[in-house]
Image (cartoon, grey):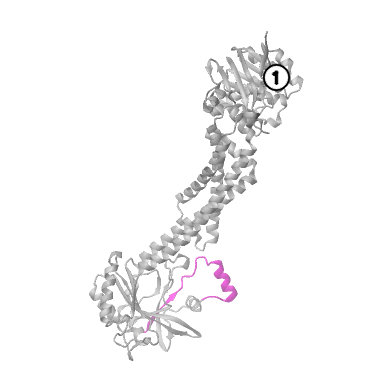
Amino acid sequence: MIHLDNITKNYGSGETEFQALKGVSFEVPQGEYAAIMGPSGCGKSTLLNILGLMDGPTTGTYRLGGDRVDDLSDELRTGVRRDQLGFVFQSFNLLPRMTAVGNVALPMGYSRIGTEERLARANKLLKRVGLINRGSHTPLELSGGERQRVGIARALANKPDLLLADEPTGNLDSKTAVGIMNLFKELNAEGMTILVVTHDRAVADQADHVIHMMDGLVREEERR
Amino acid sequence: MMIVESIRTGAIEIWSHKTRSFLSFAAIAFGVAAILYTFAHVNEMQKRTRETFELAGPGRININKKRQRGGEESPGLSKGLTSGDAVVIKKALPNLYMVSPHLSTWAEIQYQSFREHISVKGINLEWKKRNWLYTVKGRFFNQYDIDTAARVCILNEPGGWIEKPWWMRRAKKRWGWGNKFDEWVKRVELVGRKIKLNDQIFTVIGILKNPPQDKDPRWIGRDASVLIPLSTAQRYFNDQQRGGAYVPDALSDIVIDTGDENTVDTAMQRIKNILTVRHRGEEDFDLSDWREVVSQRLSRQKEQAIQILSVGIVAILAGGVGIMNVTLATIFSRIKEIGVRRAVGATRMDILSQFVTEAMMLGALGGIAGIAMGLVGIEKLARDGADKLEALLIWHYLATLGISVFAGFIFSIFPAYQASKLDVVEALRNE
């Protein structure tokens, strides 16, 4: 599914140039549950932005499902992001003025799916993540765990091939976090490829494949 | 993203920032109201001009006696403008639709205790052919009255107002402002009565009632207060002298209608030649072409319309800058949202069109508010509000609405483009 080959990422130029990634290579096959771990500043977030096609690498190649995606135009990258990737954020990033259903339906709007189907699918997804009867609430009326479930439902909206998550339990208490972790596990069991960036050993422990990063490099990979 | 969705998001945004939105479209609304007023004004003006033309006759020429100044008295070679002139013109140009000679003067009217100085005009039957807007009480002159120089007269009653302008009502209450003759004619039943004009006794045979003043298409307003046969006027109210001798058939002016706009120039030339010969080279008359009067009047009104229009355009421009400002402010406060939308799959075009749609909605709101303001304003402020509103067509409303929506579009393109260029990662990091 993911195939990274010698990815580097530089910020700034000249004297102030800073290399955030110094040649990262790894693979995540289809259906795998992978986790990236490492201390802050090791380049995890930069890597996730590149994986999520929100940023491009300075050098190196990135294949997603066999196709090169590192050199696409903004327009095409947006298309891949919309149709093949689902993104779960640490701080949920829901639109505060929209209801849960509206938030889940948002990506489908951008892929031009009709209103009725959008709503039907959004409701189904909310049910899938365990939020029955919360569809008409705005994010402010939901608890942290519920918000993250809405975020996951939104990430699943366009039936992505790959689910990317950035510290999905970082803003949650440990009890709620377990629920979210279980949800990820279930999704993986249903065949979804998942890549999680995390600080949390407990999250990493349930992954099949843990990638340890340090100073912009992959230090160690463990597979279970 | 789909337009419906953009509109919904826009509506939510506008609603949740009411003050900001209101301020931004208020200027647009003023502009739209001004433009709408201009449209109404111009239309009404054109309508009136058409009506005036129809009433006055398309081929109208006025011949006026030139006033003689002290020290420049005529040497007496010419007798001035006379009935003879009118007869000769009529004979030389038999195709003229109307040749109406008049003698205008002033006299003191007296009836019981009522006394007033009023204008008197001697006319013949030709007078009836143009500007006829009256309802007659009693009867009009007939040929017998003219031939025998009968001492009969017709009074010109004012049309009054359907709705009097407020300032006139107030002026009347405050200063007793008004016309005594008008009130007398309206108050007293006069048909068949005898009145005195200077020291001659006249019988009132008819009263001409004018149309209401707010519906009167004539610019110049009413004719003389009292009409008498031309021959009678020449006999009793004629003080024209030339070279020390009275001129028994003197006139003050002749109004001609050629019946066709295209013959005016040739007719004028011929009349000028005839009169120059008859007046033995003395240019003691003025020939004027009605079209000149009309075109002068029109160009003056056009200038006025352009002024109002430019005020409207400036207001809309100011409103557009307001919209630009609001769009920028909206974008700054929603950078995070832009990042989220981009992250879940909105293209740059999606973001751009969302903000442009929002601004166009603001423009539309401004347009609607402006139309409402314009309607109320025209109705309440303009003296002839009802006519003005009637003159407005559906496309005027659509055009003004279109202009304001377009202003929203144009002025939001730049800020919306800026928004669409935001870096996704940066935008997501924004709090």
User: The disc labelled 1 sits on which kind of residue?
Assistant: Thr
Would you say B430 lies left or right of B131 here? Answer: right
Q: Which quadrant of the figure contains the C terminus of chain A?
A: top right
Question: What is the crowding at mark 1: few (fewer than 14 residues within 10 Å), some, or many (at least 20)?
Answer: many
* Above or below for B402 versus B216: above
- On the question of residue B287 being in view, the answer is yes
Residue B162: x, y in percent?
A: 50, 65
* Above or below for B212 versus A189: below
**Pick the front one: B103 or B421:** B421
**Pick the front one: B269 or B376:** B269
Residue ranking furthest to the top:
A224
* Above or below for B180 versus B372: below
Would you say A48 lies left or right of B116 here? Answer: right
Residue B333: x, y in percent?
A: 65, 38
Residue ranking furthest to the front:
A15
Q: Quadrant of residue B271?
A: bottom left
Residue A209: x, y in percent?
A: 66, 11
Residue ranking furthest to the bottom:
B244
Q: Which residues are magenta?
A: B151-178
Q: Quadrant of residue B52?
A: bottom left
